[in-house]
Amino acid sequence: MASPVTMPKLGLTMNSGVVSQWKKKEGDSVRKGEILMVVATDKLTFDVECPQEGVLVKVLIPEGKDVPVGEILAYIGASGESVAEAPLPAEAKTAVPEESGAPEESPVKGTLPSGLRATPLARKTARELGVDIGLVPGSGPSGRIVRKDVDTFAASAPSSTVKASPVAARMAADLGVGIDSIAGKDRVMKEDVLRAASASSKVVPADADVRIPLTPMRRIIAERMSLSNSTIPSVTFNVETDFSALMAFRNRVKDEGAKKGVKISYNHILMKICAAALKEIPLANASFDGDAIVLHGNVNIGLAVSVEGGLLVPNVKSVQSKSLMRIAEETDLLVEQARSGSLALEAMQGGTFTITNLGMFGIQSFTPIVNPPEACILGVNTIVEKAVVINGEIAIRPVSVLTLVADHRILDGAEAARFLARIREIVENPWILLL
């Protein structure tokens, strides 16, 4: 009898998801552990593995449709088997008594640690080498795929194993560009594919437009930014801030952190500073919820991370109660997970405030977009030496512009200005963190 494939629960707070792409079509043979579909939530996208071997006999839910967790998406059975021989979706739902309150266990595994059949390192290696991990035989316990299995498979494969990011590989397939033809790169990125496509008259005729399909991540970013822009009446505040004391403070603490193998950056210190200011001004650590404003007890600060194909904002929980060293350790781990594609859904949820730093690009002023449902976002610009007047005398000081964009439904101008002024005060006097 054909077995149902349901929408998996990929996080504790996930209630629904979108099948952004079916990797298999009806009638295709499938192997246990190979990628069956890509599921997108409002935060992340996940590759979902096939739960069993057989044939994808029926797909019930098309790409792009949002469905609740536990909804039947498709059926996998034997060759020649029809869905008529399997329970109908409605019958499958009523098979679990409503009063039990127990969520139906999803047969789709591979996205949660307890169900993985490949180590995270093996998955990362497979993505980098462009290897379909579903084809790799595993030598680990219970057939688990480890990194050496991927390396061995890639070395013995007849096709090329040029490294390419997942986005670049998908884009190359859409544009008809051979990854092998892009030489001189340790890892092919989307920009390399675009250049190769533009240089090939067979792929892109002269003066022609190139249409690049939206990835699930880019589609979600577009939706959330449109939502923020259309629903949040935001106000922007800018203040020049003397970074002299903060630079001296950072030089002292980074040496101590280095002894313990932790690199402390300005971002880590700013997270600690913002947490202190947010506890003093609770409305800046709030959310607008219809007919009420929710003041959050914990300060969960997200740090915008640029990744291949988009932007992710994982957040460190309860920053107000953690040491600077702990904040640095957790932040660096989240950044690493975001860039390796192993970030958990929970790391993207529950944020109450966001910091985005473009200073490393020499940006002196920009207006970030509030990350709903948060009340505000802080933009950090480059530090430049400027002539300033101190006690009637001209002096050279390292100065940066801090930009706060606030939801005016929650924060009035005076309250937002007071919050930003407090951040500046602590930046210019970091010893306040010791009080």
Image (spheres, rainbow, N blue to C red):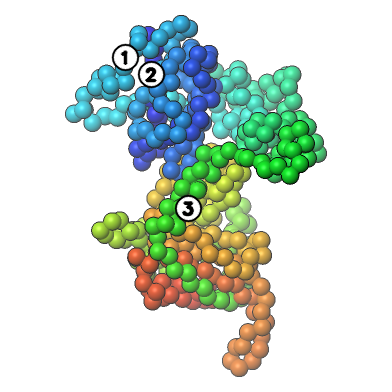
3 or 2: tag closer to the N-terminus: 2
Real-space Cα distance between discs 1 and 2? 8 Å
Please, is residue 206 above or below residue 96 in the view? Answer: below
| Quadrant of the frame with the N terminus | top left
3 or 1: tag closer to the N-terminus: 1
| Quadrant of the frame with the C terminus | bottom left
Rendering coords of residue 262 (x, y %): 59, 54
Q: Which mark is residue 87?
A: 1
* Contact (Cβ within 8 Å) of mark 1 with mark 2: yes
* Front residue (pair 16, 149): 16
For badge 1, the amino acid type reads: Pro
For badge 3, the amino acid type reads: Met
- For label 2, the residue is 4
Q: Secondary structure at mark 2?
A: strand
Please, is residue 103 above or below residue 384 in the view? Answer: above
Q: Residues within 10 Å of mark 3 (few under 14, many from 20)?
A: some
Q: Residue furthest left?
A: 99
Q: Residue furthest right?
A: 184
Q: Secondary structure at mark 3?
A: helix
Q: Residues within 10 Å of mark 1 (few under 14, many from 20)?
A: some
- For label 3, the residue is 225
* Front residue (pair 101, 151): 101
Quadrant assignment, res 19: top left
